[in-house]
Structure formats: structure tokens, C-alpha cells
Amino acid sequence: MSDYFAHPTACIDQPCTIGAGTKIWHFCHVCAGATLGKHCNLGQNVFIAAGAVIGDNVKIQNNVSVYDGVICEQDVFLGPSCVLTNVTNPRSQVSRRGLYEKTVLRRGATLGANATVVCGITIGRYAFVAAGAVVTRDVPDYALMMGVPGRPAGWMSRHGICLPKPDKDGIMICPESGWRYRCGESGILRCLDWDEEQPLPADKAVGTKLYKQLKR
């Protein structure tokens, strides 16, 4: 008996790697050679290609295809019908099977519903791509990207809350967690109160308020 769940309508081609506690729902297709970590959740009609790599605790919503060349680190969230590609200049008449471009979604990144990520870029840790945005270049850690083409529109906390303007010391405080964030000299945002490589503590891992109640 496997230590993951797959709905009877799901197609799981072997050999592939699927971690314990992962759930694969209606009409999904996991190709031979794919790698899925532990405690992932694949919503209805998700496709995982042979060369795709999915880390632990990744949530993939309905109607998402993860193609060869895509790497999702742990805790990534892929919203409904978001789009990931692997060839910049596709043509039906030209085979580029050996030229798939690598796209990396780093730990904790979020792609909103119907967002599009053009291949060959990296989405930084805990970055947040808004619904419908089209991202064509690398995204810094914690950056909020909006629009077509996607442009920086602020910073998002690890809890997915838009951070306020910095105070006189350059500190931004997440309205939900109370954790402090600051940009270093390199312009990279960092959390000052929790190791970014550690999972959230239990008391910070459950939301208690709607986004509109916390947005400033």
C-alpha cells in the first residue's frame, strides 16, 4: 500500500517519486520520472511532467501544468490555472526537446490565479506574484509583482501580507505576525525574527483574520 493518496481517476506513471502524505486528486497526471515531495496537494486536473521537481508541502491548485525544467522548492503555492512554460520561442515545426529552460520557484513563493511565468527565470523566496500578472524576469525574495508585464509593487511578508512603509530605522512590521523585516545594503529583504529556512512555529501557522482586515 502506498503512503500517498491518489484518486482513482488520477494517472500515475511509473517509475516516479511521490513523498509520504501527498494527495493527488481527480484527473491528475504524474509522468514517469517526476519527483514530488512529502505532504503536497495536487488539485483537479494537474499535470506534472517527467523532468519536473516538486518539493515538500507544495500546494498546486486546479488546472496547472508543471513542465520539464520547472523546479518548485518546498512550501510553494501555485494558484488555479497559473501558467509555467519551458521554451521561450516555441514553434510547432521546430523541436526543442533538448533545450528546455530552467525555471525555479524558491521556497515559499506564491503564484496567484492565472499568473504567467515566462521560462528561464527565478522567483525568489516568499515572493508573491499577483493574480493575472505576467512575469518575464527574475523576482527578488519577498517582492510583490503585479501587472502585465509584472512590476514590483511592494513587499509581502512570509505570511502573505503587504508590508507597510519602513520606519526611521528601515523596519517594516507584518500586521499579522508582528515579525520585523528590513532591506539590507544589497537591497534584499530579510526577516529579522525568524530563520527563513525553518518552518513556521505552530502559533504562526494558522491565519486568524481576512486579508482585507490586515491590509494597510
Image (spheres, grey):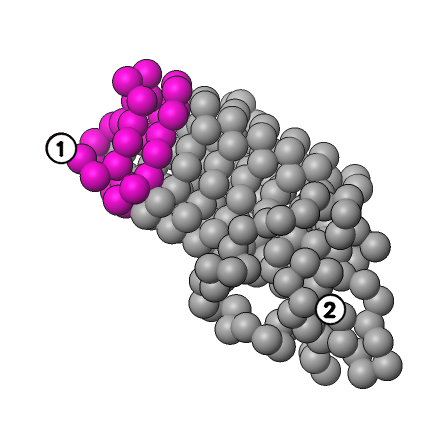
Q: Which mark is residue 1?
A: 1
- 47, 56: nearer the viewer: 56
Instruction: Give the residues drawn in magenta, as a range.
Output: 1-30
Side of 165 where 45 appears, left or right: left
- Dividing the picture into quadrants, the one containing residue 183 is bottom right
Q: Residue at x 75, y 56 (%)?
A: 162
Query: In the visual, does 21 lie left or right of 134?
Result: left
Q: Residue at x 44, y 45 (%)?
A: 58
Q: Is residue 164 above or below residue 134?
A: below
Q: Secondary structure at mark 1?
A: loop
Quadrant showing the N terminus: top left
Q: Is residue 187 visible?
A: no
The kind of secondary structure element at disc 2 is: strand
Q: Position of residue 16 (x, y in %)?
A: 24, 38
- Percent x, y for residue 139? 66, 57
Q: Which of the labelled discs sits on residue 190, or is there none?
A: none
